[in-house]
Amino acid sequence: MQEIKVELTKNPRTKPAPGDPLPFGRIFTDHMFLMDYDEGQGWHDPRIVPYGPIPMEPSCMCLHYGQSVFEGMKAYRAEDGRVLLFRPEKNMARLNSSNERLCIPLIDEKFAEEAIKKLVSVDKDWIPSGEGTSLYIRPFIIGMDHHIGVHPSSHLLFIVICSPVGAYYPEGLNPVKIYVEKNYVRAVRGGMGYTKTAGNYAASLKAQDEAEKQDYTQVLWLDGIERKYIEEVGTMNVFFVIDDEIVTPELQGSILPGITRMSCIDLLKHWGMKVTERRLSIDEVAQAARDGRLKEAFGSGTAAVISPIGHLKWGDEIMEINNGEIGPISQKLYDTITGIQWGKIKDEFGWTVEVK
């Protein structure tokens, strides 16, 4: 395993004080991890250096052709002082899945996990301890070739930055309002919907902007072919509780395979609940709402963990869900996942990894 060189900053940034607001993704720690890739040499020169600008030419390929992938994960400060990561090996496996689709050389997943642990250890004093707070970790890889022309880069840069954060949505754990998108599509099978790549999120900006103008928090995407089957919310996978069945759209190539989604399914099965991965149409959800059979809806993701959905707008139809309140399944999932993440309850699944 390659040695990671560490250069500590000589100009530490001002850390937020306990109780200070932590707007999501606006504050960054003192250091970052960098590692280069060059054709014929592979991934090399891993290092932790002071956080700062990256030298980049205007012809850099990632700026023109979008050859970039990223991940989102968190470090948590447990009540006993331990620092915990949540299923980091799943993030590294998904990063490599994105790499393969974007023609980016695969990383050594175990080494990348160790590099992240080392960076978190170096900047561990930045990890907040307030209720609902954490250290957001953003690994990403960008193509760095300095010329214009569509082809995979032969020089790339693997970067990890960290940011102390509070709640992703201003609503916190209060139910959010979601707008069902009818005009635009995010991804189709055979495309890049299952990857975490910049282009997927750029494709969502127009619909998200229009939803926010109507006072909606996020967009619920339908499939790109028939425009009827539910896929995901812009920043979350999505679940619906219809009668006694908990339904989430199946993974078929256009939906991100969320790690929180996977954890929710694992927990629901562990509890003996009926959870199904299948095609789910917006018509079925709307009919269930009309019939009073739609008991809960919620999103899952690293940023928000669990986000209850209290209001869905589909065309002219408004669906109010569970009287705009968080439901018992959403609450139990949130309490259990965050309890494991913050070390409040026993991790009987082996999901957490301690950072020494």
Image (cartoon, grey):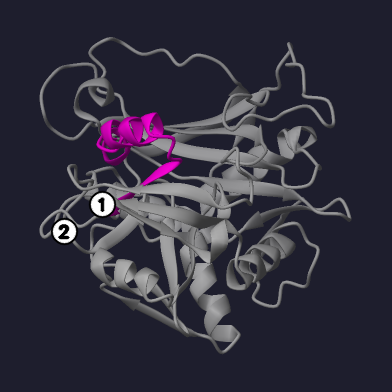
In the image, taking residue 345 as reference, residue 104 lies left or right, namely left
* Mark 1 burial class by Cα count in 10 Å: few <14, some 14-19, many 20+: many
Choose top left, top right, bottom left or bottom right for residue 80.
bottom right
* Mark 2 burial class by Cα count in 10 Å: few <14, some 14-19, many 20+: some
Checking the image for residue 189, the label placed there is 2
Q: Position of residue 229 (x, y in %)?
A: 22, 64
- Separation of residues labelled 1 and 2 (CA atoms): 7 Å
Q: Which three-letter amino acid code belongs to the residue tagged 1?
A: Gly
Instruction: Give the answer, above or below, for where 214 lies relative to 110.
Output: above
Q: Which residue lies at the image location 72% right of the left edge and 47% below the top edge?
A: 132
| Dot 1 and dot 2 residues touching (CB under 8 Å) | yes
Q: Magenta residues?
A: 199-221
- Judging by the rendered image, the residue that carries numbered circle 1 is 193
Residue 214 in view of the camera: yes
Residue 1 in view of the camera: no
Q: Which residue lies at the image location 29% right of the left edge and 59% below the top edge?
A: 231
In the image, taking residue 228 as reference, residue 78 lies left or right, namely right
Q: Position of residue 272 (x, y in %)?
A: 56, 89
Q: Which three-letter amino acid code belongs to the residue tagged 2?
A: Arg
Q: Residue furthest right?
A: 80
Q: Which residue lies at the image location 33% right of the left edge and 69% below the top edge?
A: 285
In the image, taking residue 84 as reference, residue 28 lies left or right, namely left
Q: Position of residue 84 (x, y in %)?
A: 71, 54
Residue in the foreground of this view, choosing between 29 and 286: 286
Instruction: Give the answer, above or below, for where 240 lies relative to 316.
Output: below
Q: Position of residue 270 (x, y in %)?
A: 58, 85
Q: Secondary structure at mark 2?
A: loop
Residue 281 colored magenta?
Answer: no
Instruction: Give the answer, above or below, for where 269 lies relative to 12.
Output: below
Q: Secondary structure at mark 1?
A: loop
